Amino acid sequence: MVQDVELKVEGLKKYFPIKRGIKSVMKRESPRFVRAVDGISFEIRKQQIFALVGESGCGKTTTGKLIMKLIEPTEGRIFLRGQDVSHLKSKEENLRYRKMVQMIYQDPFSSINPRFRVYDVLEEPLIIHGIGNSRSEREEMIHHALELVRLTPPEEFVSRFPHMLSGGQRQRVAIARTMILNPEFVVADEPVSMLDVSIRAEILELLRRLRDELGLTYLYITHDLSTARYFSDWIGVMYLGRIVEMGEVDMVIDNPLHPYTRALLEAVPEPEPERKEIIKSLPIKGEVPSAVNIPDGCRFHPRCVYAKMGLCDTKHPEMIEFERNHYVECHLVGKI
């Protein structure tokens, strides 16, 4: 596998301003922001699957939208194959970038136009990007895309509307729509969370096969550590806009260094037929703080059972490589 860096993110931030009421304006209060993504850095190498995991609201989907150029970053830079793509200005640059970087959305029931037949769903991106000189040429591409995602024979599916498909078939159509443009990088935003458990593994195996056949690179966004371990090569654990732990997936899950990663792993259910009930003591307390009022010091310290007052609540920890290919942002790493 080629190990060139496909995508690199440096100090990426996205702050959303909060609308102020008339009282705030009259009092000349300072603007307030939701710090959705607050200075993250990582690299994804060619044909690698990088999983970004964390609770709802941690900033992982916002990170995906920033990479997709659906929203502009407040600070930081994004590089695709060494080229700075942080702020693309012309329509042509944006169109070219969006052909190279595609997205698979979470919900196949809302990401596909219900008034389009499958043929129209797959033809639309070809028309937008000016691919195919004739309808017959585009039809051939559409049939090939459906065969790639194992919707065969394609003639049986092209005339169907989305409501005539199962959830798994809809997501395969959504994947075909992504692959029909021959992208180089794919943001997969929880692509199996809306599907039945019985077909999640099939869809992930399909994505893995397409990675190998087409030379793709993935950013896999999920809250599910079990699928992250099954599907990805590297993993980044996000909490309140920051990546707090990152490394090779087996290393992070088998030997979690950050208390938040440990809490996420403890929350994964482990069926034990001989017991009717499993009670776990999670190494975590309280609720997630507001992204408007980020705590001083380590942002996890209000919920951390190991927090050391005078250190964790005053000084922000730096990301360090504690062991080879295993990075963590914690003052107490190795001491817990």
Image (spheres, rainbow, N blue to C red):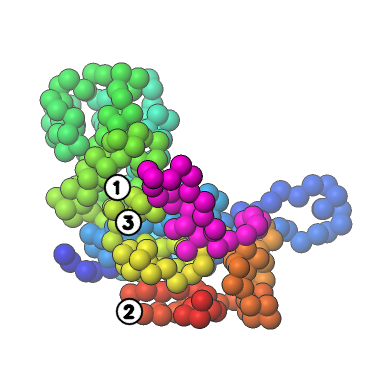
Q: What span is in magenta?
A: 262-290
Q: Which mark is residue 229?
A: 3
Question: How far from the left and from the top, in percent, is residue 158?
Answer: 21, 23
Q: Distance between the Cα atoms at labels 3 and 2?
A: 19 Å
Q: Which mark is residue 99?
A: 1
Please name whichever residue, 190 or 45, is drawn nearer the observer in this view of the structure: 190
Disc 3 secondary structure class: helix
Q: Which mark is residue 240?
A: none
Disc 1 secondary structure class: helix
Tell me whether the residue at label 2 lies in contact with that at label 1, contact meaning CB atoms closer than 8 angstroms.
no
Mark nearest the camera among 2 and 1 is 2
Q: Distance between the Cα atoms at labels 3 and 1?
A: 29 Å
Kind of residue indicated by mark 1: Lys
Question: How far from the left and from the top, in percent, is residue 310?
Answer: 68, 81
Q: Main secondary structure of the magenta part?
A: loop
Q: Is residue 216 above or below residue 79?
A: above
Kind of residue indicated by mark 3: Arg
Kind of residue indicated by mark 2: Arg
Q: Is residue 285 above or below residue 161?
A: below
Crowding at label 1, few (<14), some or many (≥20) Cα neighbours within 10 Å?
Answer: many
Please name whichever residue, 30 or 199, is drawn nearer the observer in this view of the structure: 199
Q: Is residue 35 visible?
A: yes
Residue located 55% across and 79% down the image = 331
Residue located 71% across and 58% down the image = 32
Quarter holding residue 201 = top left
Residue assigned mark 2: 324
Tell me whether the residue at label 3 lies in contact with that at label 1, contact meaning CB atoms closer than 8 angstroms.
no
